[in-house]
Amino acid sequence: MNEELKKEMNELGDVIDAKIEKASQQAIERADQKADETLKREIDNLMNKFNERMDAVEVAQKKNAEASSATTKSFRTALEEKLAEGALEAFTKGNANATTLEIKADMTTGADFTGDVIPPTRVPGYKYDPTRTFHMRDILAQGSTDSDVVRYVKESGYSDGNAPKNEGQTLGQSDFDMTAVSVPVEKIGTYFRISEEMMDSTPQLSAYLSARAPEKLLAVEDTQIVSGNGSAPNLNGLLTSATGFSGAGFSGAIDNANQFDVLAVALNQLAVANYSADYILLNPVDWHKLSLQKATTKEYLVSDWQAGMVPRIMGVPVIPTTAITSDKYIVGNFAQGAQLWIKDNVSLGFFREDGTNVRDGFVTVRCQERVTLATYLPNAFVHGDFSADITTINSGPGM
């Protein structure tokens, strides 16, 4: 019995009970008289309606039982049956401008179903690939400037006249060659447009853009710091300004040379120049190649990574980052050798009055910064290519 019919039956029962109670009261009040004939007729009519409803319930229950025993049809099956019966014949022959098919079938999400009758589950937030956990500015000295150009003076050469002398002897002369260097501030940035409706109706979008856009910009900054070619508007990156691998003293001297040997010789090149490295910059591919190398005893040559420690080679922390391409490396004293100068730090700007924004209902979002890199001490860095440098120091087959 459905809820509507059940409700109607209950209401009829309540009316009948009320009428009977009223008749009983009248009989009590007039014990020597019969109950009011009008009231009696009302009760009889209500009882007849009640019986009719009960009969209808029995018929409905019987029909439901018969329907439930029948085979359930999918929408596609019911539609195919209607078409087979010629339901569209008049329409296809041009005898009708429109037609309607009455399809009686259970609407199920079977293999032939498409649509959003069942609402999709909404997962909150925005999903995107992770960003870098490290940026080059994290290991460089930083400074702020109001100028469009950063100028500094560096030592470009030195003639050493120091020597022990006897009393009365003339001291030797030392010469310091100084060079003035200017590096222009360059702009890195982008823009994109989003609709006003998206800005107003999705607060999460603003938070997403505020976090995502600067991260993308910093990834480009990383690439510029590492490999910018110095041609405006590019920064003069470390691979361009730093000292290249020389292999001095080790040329053709190492049997079966590998990447570990190259990094050891690069660290020696820094030590000879009186610098100590604070970081080694590697592409993740090269770092994992190093990590997987084993000794003849089948033990890994790098043990720190197994314990979850900070990766190190000869005590120097290793930074695996995609900011540097595979097969290349930089070993250096990043804290002393270079500095990132910032005129305008990473910022987001929202502009309605740009181009056709007012007419189209869009907002322009600009993300930009103005920075430059000053490499004060080129000899504080050594960079190279593993494949070429292994050949330089190798005396055997190599790896």
Image (cartoon, rainbow, N blue to C red):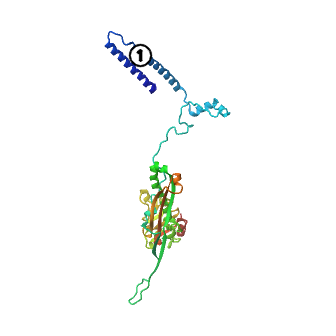
Q: In the rendered image of this protein, does residue 363 appear above or below residue 389?
A: above
Q: At which x and y percent is residue 379? A: 47, 72
Query: Which residue is the site of mark 1?
Result: 42
The quarter of the displayed image where residue 336 is located: bottom left
The amino acid pointed to by label 1 is Glu
Residue 27 showing in the rendered view = yes
The front one of 27 and 205 is: 27
**Residue 299 visible in the snapshot:** no
Residue with the most extreme bottom position: 168
Nearest to the observer: residue 301 or residue 61: 61
* Vertical position of residue 207 compared to residue 336: above or below: above
Residue at horizontal 39 percent and vertical 21 percent from the top: 14
| Nearer-the-camera pick, 28 or 159 | 28
Q: Residue at x 48, y 62 (%)?
A: 221
59 w.r.t. 277: above or below? above
- How many residues crowd around disc 1 within 10 Å: few (fewer than 14), some, or many (20 or more)? some
